[in-house]
Image (tube, helix red, strand yellow):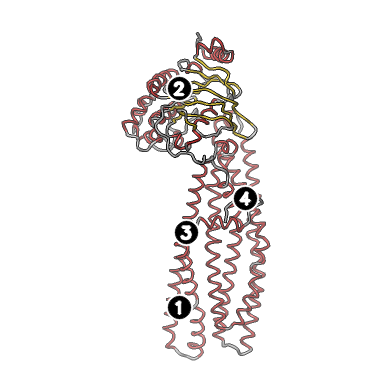
Amino acid sequence: MSDAAPAQSPSAVWLLRRLAAQLKPHWRWQAAAVIATVVYSAALLPFPWLTKLFIDDVVGAGNLDLVGPVAAGIIAAAVVMAIFHLASDYLFTTAGEQAINDLRARLMDHTLRLPLAYFRRQRTGEVVAHFTTDSVTVTGVYRAAFGAAPAALIELAVMLLVVGLIDWRFVLVSIGVMPLQMLLPALVGRPQRRAGEREQSAMAALGGLSTELVAGAREIKAFNRQGWAARRLASDLRRLFSARLRVATLLHSRHFFNIIHELIWVAIFAALAGAIFGGHVGFGVVFALAMYMSYLVRPGFVLMGAYAETQQALGAAGRLLAFLDTPAEPVRHGADRRLPAIRGEFAFERVSAAYEIGSPVIHDVSFTAPAGRTTALVGPSGSGKTTIANLLLRFLEPSGGRIVVDGRDVATVTAAELRRHVGVVFQDPVLFAGTVADNIRFGRDEISEARVVEAATIANAHDFIIAMPQGYATQIGERGLRLSGGQAQRIAIARAIAADPRVLILDEATSALDAEAERLVHAALERAAADRTMLVIAHRLATVRGADCTVVLDAGEVVDSGRHDELYGRCDLYRDLCDLQMTFDGTVNP
């Protein structure tokens, strides 16, 4: 059967089938859990019958010789029941947790394959919520629908069989009252699922807002917007409170089942009384039947609780599976998996692209970046410079035209293979918790220590690194928070150089450096670029004057291209940009 999502809201059966597929690799654990449950249920069986022997044979007939065997039987059954109850819980939990971890791994893999446009419109906190609140809630399905419910059904079947062997009429009584046990869950099941969906949505929104407020703490304090932040948080908290109150109300509505529970016991007692006064069975048998009937009632409670928990968890499952069904980056069919060594020449041939359908960012862009040369992209903000870098990295696919490397259309190779040959330093680089060396080696695990030091030296980072308490083994903290902005930028440059790419993209890579550090890094990059193709995106035009070719962009189109002196003489936009920067930073144009 296909896993394609239904056109309308997905049904519970469809969601459960998708989640059950995660258990397939762990079926041995699940099967072992079912077997343990069967043994546990079987261990319950001797208790009522041993009680019957005690009443009828020990007390009634005065056979004291049976005291020892009856006591030993009760102890043995209790030990077996305890062991296999624990085993059942352990095995069901193991299978469920392994399945949910597989699901989390799929979530991360899918997240890293989503197109860049998805993250431009989705809050980070809501994506993170799929790994935290949604996945934790979905474990309720494995615990309830695939754990507690099957165990309860097995126990129910065993008890019905035993009661039937004693007196088949009590089986009819049990079957007659069982529908009453599921009456209330059936009534509130769908509302519980909708309430669960609203709760998960509210929790994801709160997570997104919290992430945003923490990340923007500096700006909030600087602009005295603490009150504004508190009001936004209060609004999301009220929404979450309302959603969770609704969930709790529906969940605890099962206490009304106590009325039905008492009605069930009235029916059981009536049947037992009829058996006694009708002379069909003795007191010991009646007591045993009463215990077996209580065992029959208990699975109903378990099934009711499992149904309620499953309905609530399916709300989270719907969100999570919808995320997994979000289209990932397209994989070109027939694309070669390997790209041989390249010289590094690339060209844009009438390329158009958009992050959102109907909102193009660049139009018919054409230019060539010769191998081993430096090509600069300049233009006002929003002119499409970073979009060109994203296209070259295959973060975005062209809506028209093509991009070629050494004359080969990049659409004929996989994105991962293309990125093996392209390094990049972003304007706001992200470093990861770990050591300095780990971050420089991030591009390739096999990079040697000597290469790490060489790359750091080229990026003008070696001196400040060895001045740290543990040098290259120094922990830099989450997102490199223990580093200054300029230090983080230089480590990011070293990271790109260490991977030894044929094409190196610098997206405002020196924007966080002071003038002296910037001068040293540019000198180092000139040495590193001797046999590489460089694509430099810069707002500071002084940093690209030495480029072999500068491409001027405006409103997503190429306005002109050439060397600095040529463009300054003939391109009004380029000259205006240069003159404007000269006014603000004091640089002198030719």
**Callout 2 amino acid:** Pro
Labelled disc at residue 199: 4
Q: Is residue 382 above or below residue 168?
A: above
Amino acid type of the residue tagged 1 in the rendering: Ile
Q: How many marks?
A: 4
Which label was assigned to residue 95? 3
Say the numbered circle drawn on residue 148. none
Secondary structure under tag 4 reads helix
Q: Are marks 3 and 2 in contact (CB under 8 Å)?
A: no
Circles 1 and 2, Cβ within 8 Å, touching? The answer is no
For the residues marked 4 and 1, what is the alpha-carbon distance in whole angstroms? Answer: 46 Å
Separation of marks 1 and 2 at Cα, in angstroms? 86 Å
Residue at mark 2: 370
Inspect this view and state whether residue 425 appears. no
> Could you tell which of marks 4 and 3 lies nearer the N-terminus?
3
How many angstroms separate mark 4 from mark 3 (CA)? 26 Å
